[in-house]
């Protein structure tokens, strides 16, 4: 018996492809073109988003630098080192979430703040997003997925919701000539649907906490159950521009769909450090002032004479000490930074 093994080849350049049963999209190692061999999955659940060109992204970079006060008088010292673009795999999920949260808040009652126990149930549909790449942590990808989750209002179904915001297109509509002109590399997803559902459920749990527990309140208990009702794999364009300035290399990441800045790693200019130094000194002065009250006998005599109202000046002193300490500590820490992250 003769067994004929047909090798899968790239649809663009014809090079042989190394394909495993788990592969959804196979990126050609020779030309970088994304090949989809599961036609049913590819047509219904795998999409791409059209990207701005490299020229347009570079134009936006220089527009940003012209407006950035940090580079006033120094823009001629900026030089672009590298421009790179990728199609990043993003898993989107429509998650039916339910559960409850219990937390403590401070509320003003009878003229003073008291701890109040709160609890609430939730039953909601959430749109969550996760990168399809798990091998490398990337601050730009983390920020992109965070922004994706906050920008969606759920419509009839997941596909309609995504199409209304980021104009998704089926992967089969990717024009080879257009793709070649963009020179964007496709990064393959590193896991399939089953693992993606687990990650999306974990993300939905975190998202529920963000939505239903007020910020700066103590979470006492949390219960979550959910099902991924629909999902999609979207290849989304991200551009990075690396530039040299003052002997260091920094970057700005851009959303390839609309050209908006995702995140920037920028140099810490000396005038910022001076500003942080001033704020740190102010913090030291504030905490020093309230510290002198702690050791002042006259202050404590005045507090003792107040009787019922004595707690108020004590709380003011404690709050002043804490505020001054945090101000000096926070800005003192920033003074040691050589770079800053702009989101």
Image (tube, rainbow, N blue to C red):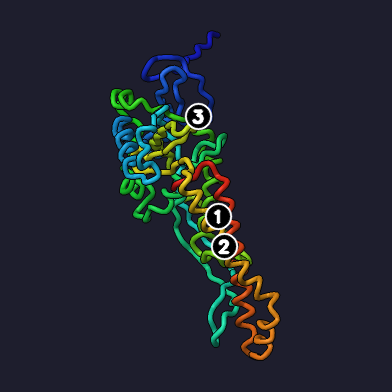
Relative to 127, 322 lies left or right: right
Is residue 290 something that shows in the picture?
A: yes
Return the disc, 2 or 1, that comes first in the chain's sequence: 2
Please report contact status of discs 2 and 1: CB closer than 8 Å, yes or no: yes
> Which residue is under mark 3?
23
Residue toward you, 115 or 2: 115
Q: Is residue 298 left or right of residue 140?
A: right
SS at mark 2? helix
Mark 3–mark 1 Cα distance, whole angstroms, equals 48 Å
Residue that numbered label 1 is attached to: 331
Picture coordinates of residue 74 (x, y %)?
Answer: 37, 37
Query: The residue tagged with tag 1: helix, strand or loop?
Result: helix
Residue 219 in percent (x, y) is at: 60, 65
Gap in angstroms between the C-alphas marked 3 and 2: 56 Å
Q: Is residue 251 left or right of residue 116?
A: left
Q: Earlier in the sequence, mark 3 or mark 2?
A: 3
Q: Position of residue 304 (x, y in %)?
A: 69, 88
- Residue in view at x 34 percent, y 54 percent: 156
The crowding category of the residue bearing disc 3, from other C-alpha atoms within 10 Å (few below 14, some 14 to 19, many at least 20), is some
Q: Which mark is residue 63?
A: none
């Amino acid at each position: 018996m003769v067994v004929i093994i047909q090798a899968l080849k790239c649809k663009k350049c014809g090079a042989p492809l190394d394909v495993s049963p788990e592969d959804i999209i196979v990126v050609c190692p020779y030309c970088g073109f994304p090949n989809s061999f599961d036609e049913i999955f590819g047509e219904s659940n795998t999409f791409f988003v059209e990207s701005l060109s490299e020229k347009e992204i570079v134009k936006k970079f220089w527009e940003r630098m012209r407006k950035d006060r940090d580079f006033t008088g120094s823009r001629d010292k900026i030089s672009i080192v590298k421009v790179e673009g990728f199609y990043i795999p993003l898993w989107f999920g429509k998650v039916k979430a339910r559960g409850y949260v219990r937390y403590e808040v401070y509320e003003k009652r009878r003229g003073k703040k008291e701890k109040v126990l709160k609890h609430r149930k939730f039953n909601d549909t959430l749109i969550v997003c996760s990168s399809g790449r798990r091998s490398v942590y990337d601050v730009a990808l983390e920020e992109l997925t965070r922004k994706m989750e906050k920008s969606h209002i759920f419509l009839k179904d997941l596909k309609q919701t995504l199409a209304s915001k980021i104009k998704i297109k089926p992967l089969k509509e990717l024009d080879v000539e257009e793709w070649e002109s963009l020179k964007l590399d496709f990064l393959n997803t590193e896991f399939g649907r089953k693992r993606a559902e687990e990650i999306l459920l974990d993300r939905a749990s975190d998202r529920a906490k963000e939505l239903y527990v007020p910020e700066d309140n103590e979470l006492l208990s949390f219960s979550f159950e959910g099902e991924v009702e629909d999902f999609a794999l979207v290849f989304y364009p991200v551009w990075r521009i690396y530039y040299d300035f003052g002997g260091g290399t920094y970057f700005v990441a851009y959303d390839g769909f609309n050209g908006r800045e995702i995140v920037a790693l920028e140099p810490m200019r000396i005038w910022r450090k001076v500003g942080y130094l001033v704020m740190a000194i102010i913090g030291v002065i504030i905490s020093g002032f309230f510290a002198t009250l702690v050791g002042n006998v006259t202050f404590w005599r005045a507090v003792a004479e107040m009787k019922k109202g004595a707690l108020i000046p004590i709380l003011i002193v404690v709050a002043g000490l804490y505020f001054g300490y945090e101000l000096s500590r926070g800005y003192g820490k920033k003074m040691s930074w050589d770079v800053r992250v702009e989101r």
